[in-house]
Amino acid sequence: MRPRVKRLLFVTVLVTAIVALFAAPAFGADTPKPVYQAPASADVGVSLNMLWVILGAVLVIFMQAGFALVETGFCRAKHAAHVVSTNFAIFGLGFVAFFLVGYGLMFGGFSFPGAFGLDSATGGPLVGSGSWVFLWHGGFALTNLHGLKNAAPVAAMFLYMVAFMDTTATIPTGSMAERWKWKSFVVWGLFCGAIYYPLFGAWTWGGGWLSQLGNSAKLGFGYVDFAGSGVVHAVGGAAALAGAMVLGPRIGKFDKDGKPHALSAHNIPMAMLGCFILLFGWFGFNAASTFSATDVRFTVVATNTAIAAAFGATVAMFYVMKRMGKPDPGMMVNGMLAGLVAITAPCAFVQPWAAAVIGTLAAIIIVEAVFFIEKRGIDDPVGAIAVHGIGGIFGVLCVGIFASGEYGAGWNLTTKGAAATASGVTGILYDFDLGGRQLASQAIGALVICTVIFGIALAFFKIQNALTKGGIRPPAEEEEAGLDLAEMGVLAYDNMVLNELDITGAEGVELVASGGPSPDPTIGR
Amino acid sequence: MRPRVKRLLFVTVLVTAIVALFAAPAFGADTPKPVYQAPASADVGVSLNMLWVILGAVLVIFMQAGFALVETGFCRAKHAAHVVSTNFAIFGLGFVAFFLVGYGLMFGGFSFPGAFGLDSATGGPLVGSGSWVFLWHGGFALTNLHGLKNAAPVAAMFLYMVAFMDTTATIPTGSMAERWKWKSFVVWGLFCGAIYYPLFGAWTWGGGWLSQLGNSAKLGFGYVDFAGSGVVHAVGGAAALAGAMVLGPRIGKFDKDGKPHALSAHNIPMAMLGCFILLFGWFGFNAASTFSATDVRFTVVATNTAIAAAFGATVAMFYVMKRMGKPDPGMMVNGMLAGLVAITAPCAFVQPWAAAVIGTLAAIIIVEAVFFIEKRGIDDPVGAIAVHGIGGIFGVLCVGIFASGEYGAGWNLTTKGAAATASGVTGILYDFDLGGRQLASQAIGALVICTVIFGIALAFFKIQNALTKGGIRPPAEEEEAGLDLAEMGVLAYDNMVLNELDITGAEGVELVASGGPSPDPTIGR
Amino acid sequence: MRPRVKRLLFVTVLVTAIVALFAAPAFGADTPKPVYQAPASADVGVSLNMLWVILGAVLVIFMQAGFALVETGFCRAKHAAHVVSTNFAIFGLGFVAFFLVGYGLMFGGFSFPGAFGLDSATGGPLVGSGSWVFLWHGGFALTNLHGLKNAAPVAAMFLYMVAFMDTTATIPTGSMAERWKWKSFVVWGLFCGAIYYPLFGAWTWGGGWLSQLGNSAKLGFGYVDFAGSGVVHAVGGAAALAGAMVLGPRIGKFDKDGKPHALSAHNIPMAMLGCFILLFGWFGFNAASTFSATDVRFTVVATNTAIAAAFGATVAMFYVMKRMGKPDPGMMVNGMLAGLVAITAPCAFVQPWAAAVIGTLAAIIIVEAVFFIEKRGIDDPVGAIAVHGIGGIFGVLCVGIFASGEYGAGWNLTTKGAAATASGVTGILYDFDLGGRQLASQAIGALVICTVIFGIALAFFKIQNALTKGGIRPPAEEEEAGLDLAEMGVLAYDNMVLNELDITGAEGVELVASGGPSPDPTIGR
């Protein structure tokens, strides 16, 4: 009975602590009982805008399932319960950390866009602090909602933003798959939600210095990233690269001569279902980033998103057929994701032809990047570094190249770039001077990700690796047996008979394998 | 050729019967041809509210896929076609019965909330009958839509409500999995849609006596259940418990000393995908239960829902790691579902901190409940009794504990509690007197589920078991071979080689298994 | 290094060509910089309508995942990577072709419904050309959006329409599964998006001669097809039939006496998940086809859709249990899909009782059609010809039978039938004269699909077969080994041990198999 008592004590303390932390305002004697009140009047437009953002948040949250399936499908069956569980658990881990800490750091409590029916008495601009690093904004654990007349807009903003954070948090679970200790992964999830993601986020969407480059340095609108090619994907890709470097390649990925071997995807239909779920959710990611449905630009955003995805998948398929003789299902998936990642920053600013070009270029760049990264001896089981890292940086730069100047004029949302100008966000193809300045802002943002943010991620994983007994990588025998039993205590497919095939040959040749980064780069050259 | 003629006759009679039943009004000579007309004027707010409810219904309908995958993933491969087929078929079975009978009993024909642009001449309150048992409301087979000016609101209301019913209907397919005759299951589906679900539904959402406790007994707002922790989940959980008791445990679950054994989940990624789909759909379940997007409280509802899910999944993971040494993927899933079930009743009435506390407590309660139920010798292959039954009751009580009084003031919707009061729904933490009365209402509702509703379910299964030749459980040899071939005529995975492993050990110990209720309760204590 | 240079050249030329093709307008010296402007005023209703259509498009795009899973689940594991990849790639292939060519042919550039806030100065009717064949409408590659004040409505319209096209394009991947060369499939995808789908589409939704039969021949409203039982499903089913005829049956499907054998589905849960995804997406397919949420008929559409699906699935299950002794999971799936396909044309025009009857009849018709088609020696691995072809034709006719006259009065959208009349679309059950004329229009449309459109598809596949070296079917040894390695270069399930079972017997009888069309038609008669 002793352990039961101990457990009871543990629960009691935990609950008491949480109640003490959050509930205090509720018991305040002189706090008048808060009465909920909708934003001024029955403003249908405001309701519509918040509905769109909530639906967008729900779609982005569903993308977690997409990531889980793509990554798990691309890995091997003996690690499948581990890989899918990291993608499952990260949702909660990142969420809890962002709820308690990260959101307050990135946005503060009273942040929501004007489209949510801003009441100037109680609300505020999207973020007004222009934080260089972190400033206290309040809003930890959403305690600022207590008794707030405008609780609804803040709640909508939070839900949308926490969903984006979780995308960043889940990206490294791909590049670090099949060789990551569960307990080390758990720490990453909390770190990402609390600190890592909000940092670049505060500098850009949080109204910080990168978003102010238009005011401070006359560089166009400052760093502009409509839905997060940089803020979400490249920042996640940077962590994915850092983590994969610290972990080193999987056993068997490279032979002693450094020649890469394909460690095949174990479930192609699973990966493709995951990719379709990501495509589905991406419409919430990009098109609801207008924060508004009364700003009807969201239809163009959605259409551009679909165009880039379609061109990305199709061009990758043709390009791989040409390069290697056969269409590779894994590369089709990564081609579509490449198009989606790259269009994410410029989606609102470009015309459909440009979305097609961006999708086309992204697909080719990502296919080559997969081979390039593998050639450098870095093992990324799903291609996350190429897709999110390289694709994200490319997307950030595309704003400065392809933005047509049609959209963004008169913006006064600090998040989206500070300067309210007569023309919209413009790329170098449309106006050499304006576009050049915009491209410079974008390049600065990209550079910050590649240096500062990547450096932080690398430091985190290196320090964690040094501090953790035995490092953050499981012992070799557990990795060879599969992490499922050792780390999770269960098998992914308890009733299925598995084999140990990792490479399947036909006609005596070693074949290119599916799953982003596995192809032998010497084939087809 | 004889059988063909017989079949033709069968079809002809069937179709004639259906046409005769429903089509009559269409042929009525003196019925003026009905002309469709939108609710008064181009009321955009009304359109928006109905769109939100339809989208909510669509999300809830999609939850059927989530249940199917969670339950199937947690079962064994040799029963997988049977388990997934029950979850598939229940959608139609429950729907048909609710369409023909249940909806009319529960709500009557002209029911829709004021947010749908109530036209007092043709419409009515959400339900005005205050039915103690069932009263004739009309609306069977939606015949009341014929020629109705306000067809749209009724159609929206019906679709949302039928989706909720199907959630209740599908819950016992989990606890009764792997040992339930198909034909017996079919009867359950029809019974649940026609009678079982509408009963408690009429007493609460249908304006019946439980919802009137505020007027009749001065117990706060009467029984309040925003989106159905009780009406949907606990009612389903009660049936799940009754069914599992009548069927008895699966062969091999308990040895002759009563010691439980893990019968492992066959597909962890499938179960986790299912859980993500449930999370996705749950936003429709809870946030669209405002029946309105112009009531912007829906953003707070959505955010509270996500918070409870995140805390539920995360706390369950840490708690199980502490209790048993390893994170259990099945318990992560059930932890998230526990948070979701528990927040469903109070989601609109509590502040974010309370959602976090509710998710935390729900996770711990459900983990312990899984072990407790197993210890009592009840076999629930997926943990449905704990998650939906215990979690649902806990959620019902949470309204009376955590409701902050911010929301609900001035309500005049009978469904949501009859008394239009100056303050909102208030729990005991915020006002001892008001909250105590509310908690009493909630406790009465919970008690009714645990006694009356559970009794009805138990009687149904016992009577069906007695009346069915050989009982409602298939012969042991079919269960041991797997129900797929015997009951469905096909295998779930025709091309896969299966093994008979149900428990996989490492280092000589029998491991805890995934899938809610399988862990050996002696481990980790 | 040579291949690398070649590749670089290839990319450069490709990109230059695309930029040259699309970007030209952007560089035009005297083109004033386009400034985006929302449709006149902050019209919330217009925003709401466009949001509904974008959400509808997103749901329909997600249906691609549903098709992929249903078709792949119904096929055998050795072909699974090939089958799922065709369903994946078709999204991009069809999209690119429709974007570049098909949309311009079908609709022209300035097409969107009045519900999108038509600005008569720059917009136009949904389509005004009444094209007999194809007319130049502009709008290729959406170049018409450049500098357009009303870019948003066109973008919304395009995204919705391209999603529908992809449904048509993916239907033959089912009937032609397991024996189709990848490169031949690729050509189909491009042909369908560019030419095949837009043809019947232009004649109906594009305002062409079939939609004008009301004006030109006094046949009711002309051909009416609310969401595409004919335009999308029957047209796709015609191609599915033509393709299956040209390919011939799979090896082993028929023995030398012509007796059919079941080639079993390899993954029932996968197929059922796919069907749930299709149900989910179908609400976007049908209910958003109002192009409007302020036209609240969408709630009735959604409810009718659900009713037909529920009755389809349930009746098919009972009917198959009666016919063959056991419920067949594959037939449950096809029963639901049958109900959905059949309700797609009449969904807005009928009352709930009629939706129930349509679902009931569709299920029985499709079950019999599966056996009928198999008996004719045509091998359709998933039942696509029956479900989409027969079900689609049945749905088209249902408009002329069951339409209640409640909806459609005063329509002035050319797409939906040209004649603005005092009463709505009326079927023969409600008015013998009016309904007879409507039924004639519907029959003419159905006839055109069965003759002209089927003929075009047959000619396409026959010509392609003749022109392709070795034909469009892979060599027998590749088919027997499974197309995955030979065509895709990877296995679907690299780590799983597969068997070669295609038929599993119990008690010495050959069992009916799941997956639409596989049952041995001699059983149960």
Image (cartoon, coloured by chain):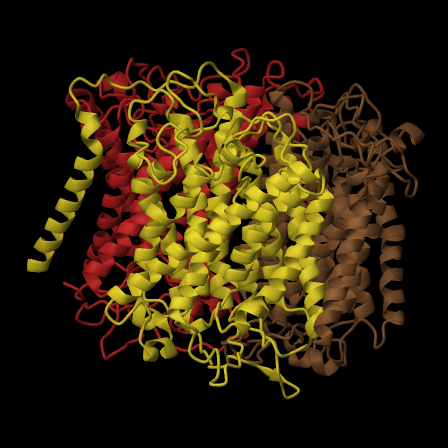
Chain colours: A yellow, B red, C brown
User: For the view shown, which residue lies furthest in the top direction?
Assistant: B121
Q: Is residue A261 above or below residue B318?
A: below
Q: Looking at the image, how many numbered discs can be counted on the residues? A: 0
In this orientation, which residue lies closer to the viewer: A485 or A248? Answer: A248
User: For the view shown, which residue lies furthest in the left direction?
Assistant: A2
- Can residue C168 be spotted in the picture? no
Q: Is residue A211 above or below residue A124?
A: below
Residue A517 falls in image quadrant: bottom right
In this orientation, which residue lies closer to the viewer: B506 or C517? Answer: B506
Using residue A63 as the reference point, say whether residue C282 is left or right of it: right
Tell me the quarter of the image containing the N terminus of chain A: bottom left
Using residue C202 as the reference point, say whether residue A80 is left or right of it: left
Residue A328: x %, y % from top left: 64, 69
User: For the view shown, which residue lies furthest in the front direction?
Assistant: A217
In this orientation, which residue lies closer to the viewer: C347 or A524? Answer: A524
Residue B245: x %, y % from top left: 27, 55
Residue B228: x %, y % from top left: 36, 36
Q: Is residue B492 above or below residue A436?
A: below
Tell me the quarter of the image containing the C terminus of chain A: bottom right
